[in-house]
Amino acid sequence: DSLWYSTYIGGTGNDVGAAIAVAPNGTVVIAGYTSSEDFPMLGNGVQTSNRGGFEAIVMQVDTTLATESVRYTSYFGGASTDVATGIAVTPGNQVYLSGYTMSADFPTAGDAPQLEYGGGGDAFLVRFDLNKPGLDALDFGTYLGGTDTDLSYGLRRDSTGRLYLVGYTMSTDFPVTESAFQRDKNGEADLFLTRFDVASNGSVGINYSTFLGGNATDIGYGLAVDNAGRVAISGYTYSTNFPLAGNSHQPALGGGYDAFVSVLNVNQSGAAGLIYSTYFGGPATEVGYGVAFDNRGNLALAGVTTSLDGIVAGTSPAQQN
């Protein structure tokens, strides 16, 4: 009796749900990607056909309905690979979708900060107004990236309506702001954090953008934002000199690669912006996939490990040694 709602949705190809959000009206909005050319479409979406390869998808589901619970479906992308990895919903039923694209013809719209494809794969951020029909629902769309590979894995919206994207970049010319903690790429790939402001007229612009990384590869996956302007990022790093700050739990790389958690105050410029950062791992490998603030400002980190020791702590009866 505890299972209230469950359904399949997909076509004859591969269909992946990558992110989920609950709208203020109680509906569930899902982002992902599909290779199916027959993914179920209702005809009310911005794009009703797969333009090529894997295509991003967004759908809205009313889980209070036993039948006809899917309220909105749309493909979204260009002629190449387009993957949606993040989603956020506003009180006005606007949906922000983020991810990455290999399409030079990815749909852009509105007063976008980057209308042209940088190359090698770019992150993207788009906004749909689900109160509007068909193509009219797309009121903003932008690339985010330089001339090499730039992939976004996480999206969060804070209480003021600002949008935060996290991922990684191999581009030395990835767009960063004057206030960035780190203005130059240090390793083969550095994670990036970018904040977008939404103006009263609906236009969206980059307010803060920074690299964060050391001398090797650093990938950002998880993202959390609190009401004090702090942004927590989790992921993994190969770098022996990953930027650390505060009273780090673990001040050195423990194995082949370690998880990390870093906290930035993006209202502070330069080095002052990094207020806490630590490695987390044992002698083998760890990846941090999710991070969250609790109501006291503490952090929770979740991920995977192959280490047989160096991870477990505390006295919880549920822990596995």
Image: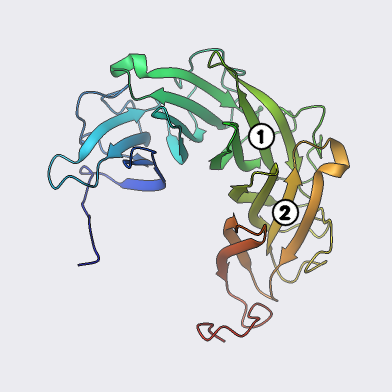
Which picture quadrant has residue 290? bottom right
Residue shown at 72%/31% (left/top)? 208
Say which quadrant the C terminus sits in. Answer: bottom right
Residue shown at 67%/61% (left/top)? 298
**Residue under label 2:** 262
Q: Amino acid at mark 2?
A: Ser
| Side of 181 where 255 appears, left or right | left
| Side of 292 where 262 appears, left or right | right
Which x, y percent locates residue 113?
A: 62, 18
Q: Nearer the viewer, residue 46 or 227?
A: 227
**Residue under label 1:** 194
| Side of 56 where 271 appears, left or right | right
Numbered mark located on residue 130 in the image? none
* Vertical side of 110 occupied by 91: above or below: below
Give the number of marks. 2
Q: Are marks 2 and 1 in contact (CB under 8 Å)?
A: no
Residue shown at 58%/37% (left/top)? 159
Spatial CA distance of label 2 from label 1 is: 14 Å
Which x, y percent locates residue 38?
A: 20, 35
Is disc 1 surrounded by few (<14), some (14 to 19) or many (20+) residues within 10 Å?
many
Q: Nearer the viewer, residue 158 or 125?
A: 158
Residue shown at 40%/24% (left/top)? 128
Q: Amino acid at mark 1?
A: Thr
* Vertical side of 39 occupied by 4: above or below: below
Label 1 residue SS: strand
Is disc 2 surrounded by few (<14), some (14 to 19) or many (20+) residues within 10 Å?
many
Does residue 174 appear in the picture of this structure? no
Residue extending farthest right: 271
Which picture quadrant has residue 43? top left
Which x, y percent locates residue 90?
A: 45, 32
